[in-house]
Amino acid sequence: MLKKSLKAYPEKLRRVKFQVLETGKKIVLLTNNFELPAETVALLYKKRWQIELFFKWIKQNLHIEKFFGESENAVKLQIWTAISAYLLVAILKKELNVKESQYEILHFLSDVLFEESPIKSLFRNSDYKSEDSDLSNQLSLLDL
């Protein structure tokens, strides 16, 4: 195994070992940076791990499988659009007291995206907070 690893990356590596304060777990990293202090390498790893967790959350909750563009602006636009849709569904779920998961709601809404039906009628079996709430100050999305 060592020979195979040396063949794949023949340069020298530095072994950095640190303990995660929150969990007490010990982690060993390999780096080719011999100049940064071990604490900085550990901090960079922790920051990178937070980014990895964020993208995992995006894939699981926002259902972004791939990015349609490669520029920073394209990626930001796609992420913000997905987060906006996620939050709108969370608000809908709470306001209409819908029992289904956000994933099920998103899936259902994607099927009825172009139907001209009031949102409340799409979730008839849900327990609405108030059937006769005053919506006189609300704009109708379908009348625009």
Image (cartoon, grey):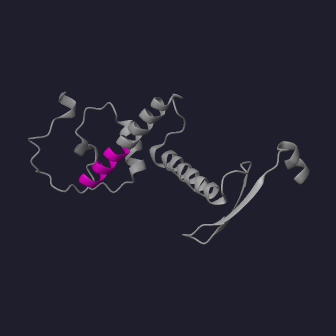
Q: Relative to residue 20, is residue 75 depicted above or below?
A: above
Q: Choose top left, top right, bottom left or bottom right for residue 77.
A: top left
Q: Residue at x 44, y 35 (%)?
A: 76
Res. 142 in view:
yes
Main SS, magenta region, reads helix
User: Which residue occupies the extreme right position in the image?
Assistant: 3
Q: Relative to residue 40, is residue 109 depicted above or below?
A: above
Pinpoint residue 90: horizontal percent, then vertical percent.
Answer: 33, 50
- 101 part of magenta stretch: no
Q: Residue at x 28, y 54 (%)?
A: 94
**Left or right: where does residue 133 sit relative to residue 142?**
left
Res. 1 in view:
no
Query: Dividing the image into 4 quarters, which one contains the C terminus?
Result: top left
Pinpoint residue 128: horizontal percent, then vertical percent.
Answer: 21, 55
Q: Nearer the viewer, residue 117 or 54?
A: 54
- 95 part of magenta stretch: yes
Pinpoint residue 24: horizontal percent, then vertical percent.
Answer: 60, 72
Q: Nearer the viewer, residue 36 or 122?
A: 36
Q: Residue at x 25, y 32 (%)?
A: 116
Q: Choose top left, top right, bottom left or bottom right for residue 39.
A: bottom right
Pinpoint residue 85: horizontal percent, then vertical percent.
Answer: 36, 41
**Left or right: where does residue 24 sit relative to residue 11?**
left
Q: Nearer the viewer, residue 89 or 119?
A: 89
**Left or right: where does residue 58 sit relative to residue 124?**
right
Magenta-colored span? 86-96
Q: Residue at x 39, y 43 (%)?
A: 83
Q: Nearer the viewer, residue 126 or 138?
A: 138
User: Which residue occupies the extreme bottom position in the image?
Assistant: 24
